[in-house]
Image (cartoon, rainbow, N blue to C red):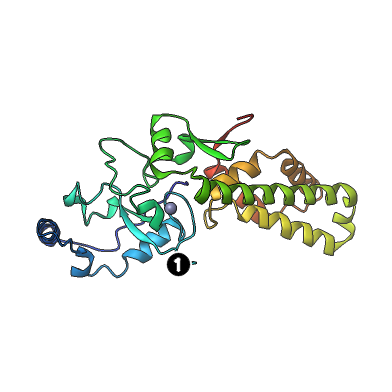
């Protein structure tokens, strides 16, 4: 999970129109046929703005949306069933994947009664840490612990298996680059082809840690705490091969990076 900068509201509702939409919603629920009030107003830019806010990822699990059938659902952070007056409130909406928005995820969990983290309001890296050995995201405080539990951020099938595979792959790539650099370091200066290849691979690793990539918080955490990667960075810097594009991705990774628990 990463911090999300919420853009300005894509729609403007007068107080009167807002009251009307809330009324339609409440009435439809009372009649047992919940109506989607979005259909009653001009909300065509809503999904676009939500996607823009989260770089087309789920605000909770950071999985990519609108690919492979994983369609975006606007989640009401304060569930509309319990807080119907927040049904059309822009600041109450977060882009979510089907799983996180379903009953087996956040569903209509009451965030007032049992708070969880809203990534458009709080910085996740102040509430989560990462366990290097088990690949798990752990809460640092009660809010973090509850968030992990409610959203099932360590679900074995859905999250852990994929996370382990990708993190292991990332570590292997780092190791491969490190070994190649150790063996052929002088070529960074003499062989443009070699230099370009190493730069491309390093850039690829860094790209995974930026907000546009899925699961970027975990990858940023892993890469920034990885000793061999530090060695790669220093070697490239010493040979004038660490680019400004790498540096800006490296800085962005720091924004998302969790602290780490070693040995758990
Ligand atoms: Zn999700």
Vertical placement of residue 114 versus 108, above or below: above
Q: Nearer the viewer, residue 242 or 179?
A: 179
Left or right side of 103 for 141: right
- Residue 71, given in percent of the width and then of the height, sits at 41, 64
**Mark 1 secondary-structure assignment:** loop
Q: Which of the 4 image quarters holds residue 218?
A: top right
Q: Residue at x 57, y 51 (%)?
A: 162
Q: Nearer the viewer, residue 192 or 232?
A: 232
The residue beneath circle 1 is 69
- Residue 170, given in percent of the width and then of the height, sits at 68, 50
Left or right side of 50 for 233: right
Q: Residue at x 59, y 37 (%)?
A: 134
Across the whole image, how many numbered discs are drawn on residues?
Answer: 1
Q: Nearer the viewer, residue 227 or 13?
A: 227
Left or right side of 131 for 195: right
- Residue 203, given in percent of the width and then of the height, sits at 68, 56
- Residue 168, given in percent of the width and then of the height, sits at 67, 47
For label 1, being within 8 Å of ligand 1 is answered no
């Amino acid at each position: 999970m990463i911090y999300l900068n919420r853009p300005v509201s894509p729609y403007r509702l007068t107080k009167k129109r807002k009251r009307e939409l809330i009324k339609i919603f409440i009435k439809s629920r009372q009649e047992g046929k919940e109506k989607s009030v979005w259909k009653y107003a001009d909300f065509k830019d809503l999904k676009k703005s939500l996607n823009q806010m989260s770089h087309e990822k789920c605000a909770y699990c950071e999985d990519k949306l609108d690919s492979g059938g994983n369609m975006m659902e606007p989640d009401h952070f304060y569930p509309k069933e319990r807080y119907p007056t927040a049904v059309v409130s822009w600041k109450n909406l977060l882009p979510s994947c089907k799983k996180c928005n379903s009953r087996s995820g956040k569903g209509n969990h009451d965030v007032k009664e049992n708070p969880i983290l809203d990534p458009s309001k709080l910085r996740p890296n102040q509430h989560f840490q990462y366990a290097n050995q088990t690949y798990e995201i752990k809460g640092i405080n009660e809010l973090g612990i509850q968030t992990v539990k409610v959203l099932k951020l360590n679900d074995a099938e859905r999250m852990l298996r994929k996370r382990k595979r990708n993190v292991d792959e990332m570590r292997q790539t780092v190791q491969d680059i490190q070994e190649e650099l150790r063996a052929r370091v002088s070529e960074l200066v003499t062989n443009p082809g070699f230099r370009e290849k190493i730069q491309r691979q390093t850039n690829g690793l860094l790209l995974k840690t930026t907000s546009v990539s899925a699961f970027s918080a975990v990858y940023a955490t892993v890469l920034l705490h990885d000793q061999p990667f530090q060695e790669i960075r220093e070697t490239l810097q010493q040979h004038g091969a660490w680019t400004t594009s790498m540096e800006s991705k490296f800085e962005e990774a720091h924004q998302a990076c969790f602290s780490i628990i070693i040995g758990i």
